[in-house]
Amino acid sequence: MLFTTPALTEIEVHVHRAIDQLREKLTYSFGSRRWVGLLSRVSRAKAIQGSNSIEGYTVTVEDALAAVDGEEPLDASGENWAATIGYRNAMTYVLQLTDDKHFGYSPDLIRSLHYTMTSYDLSKHPGRWRPGSIFVQNEATGERVYEGPDVELVPELIDELATELNGENSHPVMVRAAMAHLNLVMIHPFSDGNGRMARCVQSLVLAREGIIAPEFSSIEEYLGRNQLEYYEVLADVGQGSWHPERDATRWVRFCLTAHYRQAMTVLRRSLEFNRMCNAVDELVEKFKLPERTFYALTDTTQGFRLVNSRYRSVAEISQNLASRDLAHLCALGLLEAHGERRGRFYTASPITREIRTRTREPRVPIHDPFSELTETAPPQLALFR
């Protein structure tokens, strides 16, 4: 027996409609604009960073971008970097499966994703079910907060989960993805990496539905920024051990709230990105620069440190040409260089920092979409504030 999807009230249906409206706005906002690929790249990096940070693997957004681009990190090393690469590889596989005509959920798929994610440490039994009991502890207090189901139950529970995911289901995709996440993390089938796997599978369910780009549908960034509430909701639903008979409504509402707020964040980010890219285009035209320098200027204008290898990878040019471009941008006062030789990196100059300042959207707290609703008469949600 798994956790069952709760019956949706008019409240959940109304919030889901509001999220659909946001998705439509995002689809229109993206259109065929050339900067969407750059925004997608940043969104993937923030999702990787957010999901791994929940498990204590911390890297900068710049190093998460390096992972996305297949480049070496500026700061990360050791297990932090290995975990980042593992998660990147697993999510890359998820993206490959979005339109696979022969796709099907299976225990082997789940184990393969786990191997891809954790193979850097064989002590984590990558790709294998946990060999025995498992307990989750509060790192701050040492208190045991959750005990997974008996190890003998794991294979049949995962079989049931795969069967459910492959079956017909009339519930909205965001609810189905949330329930896949909940069931996998509560089964806790692996020795390590269960949270990352549950978030990865949630993203896979979303990606398979083809709702805009998977990078823009993921709530991993949101979960990484709201870890305490994430853990608190899971603890409330789980009540310390395997209790699939419990009501999962609070979990579903938490995930719908995450989707709503993440969609609002991506929409705000897309508006900023559009204005920023227009301003960078004007700069490229003003200084009569090659179009490819747009990539160097957009990365640094966003506040990221840029290295030669990343620029030449994104712009698809040689190392020598990248070096000449970057030196020229420094000479014009559009970039600032730091360090020497292999340690050299580039940051925004006062000119490009000013672009970032004037193109930013005001930071206004995003409301809880459930806070404005009642069971009997849900009012119209304000989509923008």
Image (tube, rainbow, N blue to C red):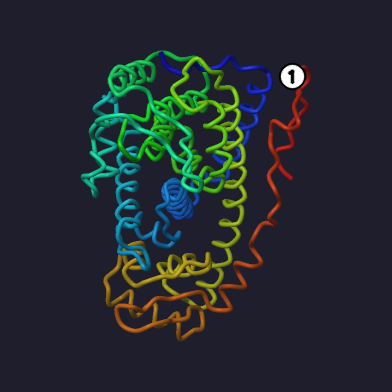
* Quadrant location, the C terminus: top right
Residue 37 seen from this side: no
User: Going by the picture, which residue comes out furthest to the bottom?
Assistant: 331
Left or right for 38, reference 104: right
Pinpoint residue 112: horizontal percent, then vertical percent: 24, 34
* Quadrant location, the N terminus: top left
Q: Label 1: which residue?
A: 375
Mark 1: which amino acid? Answer: Glu
- Within-10-Å neighbours for mark 1: few <14, some 14–19, many 20+: few
What secondary structure is marked by label 1?
loop
Residue 252 seen from this side: yes
Pinpoint residue 57: horizontal percent, then vertical percent: 40, 53
Left or right for 118, reference 168: left
Please report the residue visible at 28 percent of the width from the left and 20 percent of the height from the top: 152
- Asked whether 303 or 197 is in front, the reply is 197
Pinpoint residue 75: horizontal percent, then vertical percent: 37, 67
Please report the residue visible at 41 percent of the width from the left and 29 percent of the height from the top: 147
Pinpoint residue 48: horizontal percent, then vertical percent: 41, 49
Left or right for 292, reference 178: left
Above or below 287: residue 123? above
User: Going by the picture, which residue comes out furthest to the left?
Assistant: 122
Residue 66 occupies which quadrant of the picture?
A: bottom left
